[in-house]
Amino acid sequence: MVIALALAGAVQGGVSPARAEQNGTSAGRQLLFYNHAYGVLDRATADAIEHSSYLRDFANFQVRTTTGSGGQTWTGRYLMGRETYFELFGVGDVPGKDGTLGSAGLGVSTERAGDLPTVIERLRKAGISDPVEFQQTRDFGDGVPVPWFDAVFTTDQYDLFGAWGMEYRPEYFADPRGNTEPASHPGDVGRERYLSDAYRDHLMRDVTDIRLAVTARDLASTVPLLKAGGFAVRSLPGGGAVAKGGGTTIRFDSVPLDQVGLRQIEMSLNHPVSYRHVERIGHSALVVGPGSRAVWTFEEQDRPAAG
């Protein structure tokens, strides 16, 4: 999902940083889990990813254009696992500043129907005076928008990174074009149900660790959401943070605006491998094995020269 497109027409929220900081990690069970993240890469790297034959063997890999709310579209490169995935864009693949080099986003979702309102209530108690709530839809090509998921931001003000909490809608699961799975229990709106089992035919299983470089302002807006979702969030020297919970660790580096971006993704594999394979893809390196993990590092991108 693209941040600006989701925020179009939404009501602005407000953050009270002092109260949000005082509350620490929210009490109670974990309600939000890493769902997916996206990053905008330079054109050479995005094109290399799109045309990589190796990635089509390594993961359930797709290149697709999605039509969301208001007819807005975005084209991404998707690597999907059992419960988690990520999407990669090139500069200009999405409109506005969300298509800028280094732009990134993070979606964290519920597993049980009705948990998102609890997250929103936790946000209000933590000092988010008016969370930004919205509903995303998806058009499968017939011009009829299907409710896709409900979501919440802490604010509509951001530099180049935003995070949102989300809960999939029953209408989406009921539409066969979504290629989702049957519910495994009452109220199942989980990630495993949403994603197909095509991951079984590839090496990649799930995202276990992701590292993002964001501005201090964007990090300050993100931490309250993660805490409200039940993540254990720890501040780091230098202003960064680490959020743990639900099998995925999310690491944030606090950097100036001209250094933001997706930096690294670590994935579990469906089975261990005995070798170490390095696949260079544009300005990035995917290292697979040995063992049951792969690490994809995104190097310094081709940033435009300052004017």
Image (tube, rainbow, N blue to C red):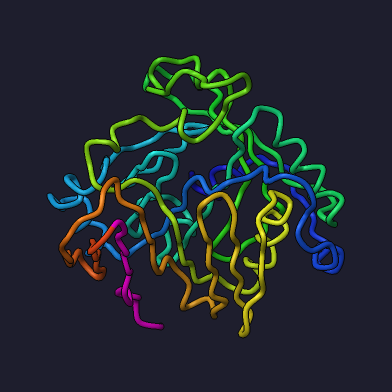
Seen at 66% across and 40% down, the residue is 9
Give the mark count. Answer: 0
Quadrant (top left, top right, bottom left, bottom right) of the C terminus: bottom left
Q: Which quadrant of the view contains residue 115? A: top right
Q: Which of the pair 14/281 is nearer the observer?
A: 281
Query: Residue 12 lies in magenta, yes or no?
Result: no
Left or right: 234, with 267 as reference point: right
Residue situated in front as seen by the camera: 149 or 246:
246
Which quadrant of the view contains residue 60? Answer: top left
Image check: 168 left or right of 132? left
Q: Quadrant of residue 109?
A: top right
Residue 293 in the image: state x and y as whole percent: 31, 59
Indicate the position of residue 146 as horizontal and vertical percent values: 51, 21
In the rendered structure, the answer to whether residue 51 lies left or right of residue 129 reads: left
Q: Is residue 157 above or below residue 61?
A: below
Which residues lie in the magenta part? 292-307
Who is closer to the viewer here, 228 or 291?
Answer: 291
User: Measuring 50% from the left and 55% from the top, which residue is drawn there?
Assistant: 248
Q: Position of residue 104 (x, y in %)?
A: 48, 59
